[in-house]
Image (tube, grey):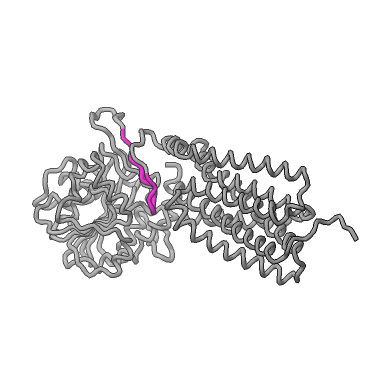
Amino acid sequence: MTTDAPARPRWRPARAAVLLAVFVCAACGLVYELALVALGSYLIGDAVGQASIVLGVMVFAMGVGALVAKPLQSRAAAAFAAIELTLALLGGLSVLGLYAAFAWLDLYGPALVGTAFVLGLLIGAEIPLLMVLLQRIREQSAGSAVADLFAADYVGALLGGLAFPFLLMPVFGQLKGALVVGAVNAVAGLALVGTVFRADLGRRARLALGAGSVVVALGLGYAWVTAHDFEVTARQQLYRDPVVHAERSRYQEIVLTRSVREVGHADTDLRLFLNGDLQFSSIDEYRYHESLVHPAMNGPHGEVLVLGAGDGLALREILKYPDVRRVTLVDLDPAVVRLARTEPQLRELNHHSFADPRVRVLNLDAFGWLRTATDRFDVIVADLPDPDETATAKLYTVEFYALIRSALAPGGRLVVQAGSPYFAPRSYWSIEHSVREAGFATVPYHVDVPSFGDWGYVLAAPGATPPALALPADVPPLRFLTPSVLAAAATFPADRARLDVPASTLLQPRVLEYARTEWRGY
């Protein structure tokens, strides 16, 4: 008896091969999802929003892909191989393409949705085709086959979820990590079809898949070779001045630029950016840091705590007081502190502040560290990144300021950099309200920092009596801040008067939404 159907492969090793392919493909698919979320978090700063968009669009597209795969089941082996090659190429190049869309085209949002949809469509088509292939090896009940497939799929997703942050990102980075996963994806698909289901492929299908394999290999290989040059060129597109240092730490992208373009200034303008946000310009940073530090030093200041400020510039101002006994700096990212210790121009700018024996550095999360801190401080300086990301919004909440209050010594003061009362008034006044709700009496004030515009701070002390907004009697010589300038800083014009906005909390991080909407377009 003869039949036109291809002979079934030996079922035990063949079945194991199919489930292994499911395992690997699931791991690759989840890495693609995580890569899109991570890239959006770095570039846009909205981790929750980016995750919601990517996961929502991809899950929807996976459902569409499962339906689209129905007509392909008659040629399941060839269709599966073609889908894996396409997914490998598009998934592997997805980070590169989205970064290009962000840097050159300003089309990141539409590009993200389109990429997530296409990748989800292809991922969704995998399971129905793999189900057909599994049943071709050995027929089994639908429930048993589904259980086997989804078990391998979910375990593979676990592997991808762990591999992305702990292996791919640290070893290869985002761009090359996606290329590696694309290559693995292609090999897994071709290996399964080319061995177990080779008999299912006609001559045309073999030629087409061979040509497709060459295209994918060339595309991913060329992207691998040119990845560094592409990243340097794309990154430079985002900054007006030459990039002199760039690195991706575990927590953020750190970029230093340097130029001599400022009219009327002979000095080089050194600028630090974290995830694209300007942290300082060496032309006018003294205005920001003098205004941040010195009003809070009016009173006892033997023990000082600095939260954030890993660039060492706030430290420079604090260390100008000889009676400061110790400064504890808590900054999450050791890469920023390392740069401030080693980059020659930055070291010169911060007056080698990290070499001072009075300085103790802790590379820890400020929120977690404060929960267990036993030391008490005369002054606490909260010089933290703006609350425009989920990770930083918790550092501008009532709960966080309550932890700070418990770390203050009697008579201690807190100062918070609170953003711009001009460009982001709701954010600014929400921060001020959060400090008050944590049990502080507050004095809001603001100054002009040309690189930032109108910039605001909140000086606070526990209890009902606000601290005096004044310079210490032993204040060192300053370049910008004078008693009259500081007195004027407490006055807000009519178009920027206090707003009655609610405080921000861990469960309702209102400041995050305010920061996202108010800074849009700036």
Q: Is 305 drawn above or below residue 373 in the view shown?
A: above
Q: Nearer the viewer, residue 394 or 176?
A: 176
Let me know if residue 251 is in the magenta part: yes
Q: Indicate the quadrant where residue 10 lies.
A: bottom right
Image coordinates for residue 128, horizontal then vertical, percent: 71, 59
The residue drawn where x is 19% and y is 41% is 480
Let me know if residue 399 is in the magenta part: no
Q: How many marks?
A: 0
Image coordinates for residue 512, horizontal then vertical, percent: 42, 56
Q: Nearer the viewer, residue 61 or 396?
A: 61
Asked if residue 349 lies left or right of residue 115, the reply is left
Asked if residue 144 lies left or right of residue 233, the reply is right
Asked if residue 459 lies left or right of residue 25, the reply is left
Q: Which residues are magenta?
A: 247-258
Q: Nearer the viewer, residue 211 or 178?
A: 211
Image coordinates for residue 429, horizontal then vertical, percent: 35, 55
Q: Quadrant of the N terminus?
A: bottom right
Q: Nearer the viewer, residue 140 or 90?
A: 140
Image coordinates for residue 357, horizontal then vertical, percent: 14, 55
Q: Is 477 drawn above or below residue 437 in the view shown?
A: above
The residue drawn where x is 70% and y is 59% is 130
Q: Is 368 drawn above or below residue 211 in the view shown?
A: below
Residue farthest to the right, as pictured: 1
Q: Is 5 drawn above or below residue 107 in the view shown?
A: below
Q: Main secondary structure of the magenta part?
A: strand
Q: Quadrant of the C terminus?
A: top left
